[in-house]
Image (spheres, rainbow, N blue to C red):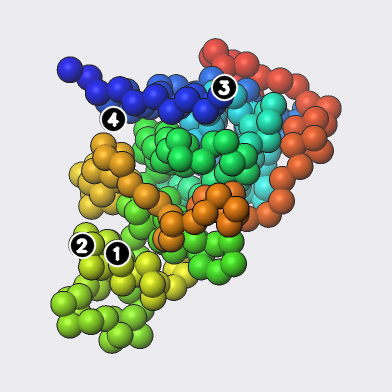
Amino acid sequence: MVRKTMVNCFHTRLPLVGRRPVCSRARVVVDDATRTETRRVAVGLFGRLLRSPEYADLAGAPDDAVVRVRPLRGMLQLEMVQAARYGYCGAHLVLGDRPETVLVCGGYRILDRRLYGQRLTLGMCHRQLTAASSLGIQTVLASADRGPGEDGYYRWPRLGFDAALPRAIVRSLPRALRRARRLLDLMQSQAGREWWRRHGIGLNVAFDLRPGSHCWRVFLRNLAGTIDLRPVKASASSRGGCSTRARGRHDPGARVGRRCQKVTCGDRRP
């Protein structure tokens, strides 16, 4: 029996069927002025042109999102925003040269409090990781920050992202956790998660997309269950609306509302 989970956030839908998310139906837009360069960069990164649904999936976009694709100094920038309510957004970069193409995930920012608690971040991450793997990308990078409004230091490892622990952290671990050398080593136990929740620091983290990797095992185990990605139980008044946070500010009116040619899902290539 196929296990199905539906994340239904008003018109935000992220169906997860088995281990592979259903293809996104988000709208993809590309500026007319950069269309030729976008295609050239895409061929350099992936060896071929991508279809609109592939761009949408690579951005982790729910069906009601708008994804803007544009070239940036030999890289591809993917900007995602909820079209109607501006309830969430995200920004990502694809860079490198085949076969060393890398996805840099800028995170997912949940802005509408009505979307809290609906596992939207988990669904977007699942869609994005699966799409990146199918396109031959082997590594996804992210910045797991800690600070005011920043709790990626705890959320990213809960999603399977890993990093080597700095020596200072290893030396400060309690005796029961002293054997841990990597971030996911700590996250395997309740004691380790609680210690990192209190004493963790910001790190650059990575997700190994190779089949059967430890990162995938952790992510799929958490996907099958119910996990709390927050490092602390925040009250409704103190929640900042931030998930694994995207850097930079997003103005959907300025970015998506410019003169551009809309590309529908189908087989058309932007």
How packed is label 1: few (under 14 Cα within 10 Å), some, or many (20 or more)?
many
Quick one: 129 or 103, which is closer to the camera? 129
Residue behind mark 4:
19
Residue behind mark 2:
189
Mark 2 to mark 3 CA distance (whole Å): 36 Å
Question: Could you say where residue 236 lies in the image, as x and y percent from the top left?
Answer: 55, 50
**Dot 1 or dot 3, earlier in sequence:** 3
Q: Quadrant of residue 180?
A: bottom left
Q: Are marks 2 and 1 in contact (CB under 8 Å)?
A: yes
Vertical side of 151 occupied by 209: above or below: above
Q: Tell me the quarter of the image containing the N terminus.
A: top left
Q: Quadrant of residue 40?
A: top right
**Dot 4 or dot 1, earlier in sequence:** 4
Q: How many numbered marks does the figure carry?
A: 4
Residue at the spot x=34%, y=54% of the render?
158
Residue behind mark 1:
193
SS at badge 4: loop
Residue behind mark 3:
11
Question: Could you say where residue 133 lies in the image, as x and y percent from the top left?
Answer: 36, 38
Depth check, mark 3 against mark 4: the one in front is 3
Quick one: 182 or 266, which is closer to the camera? 182
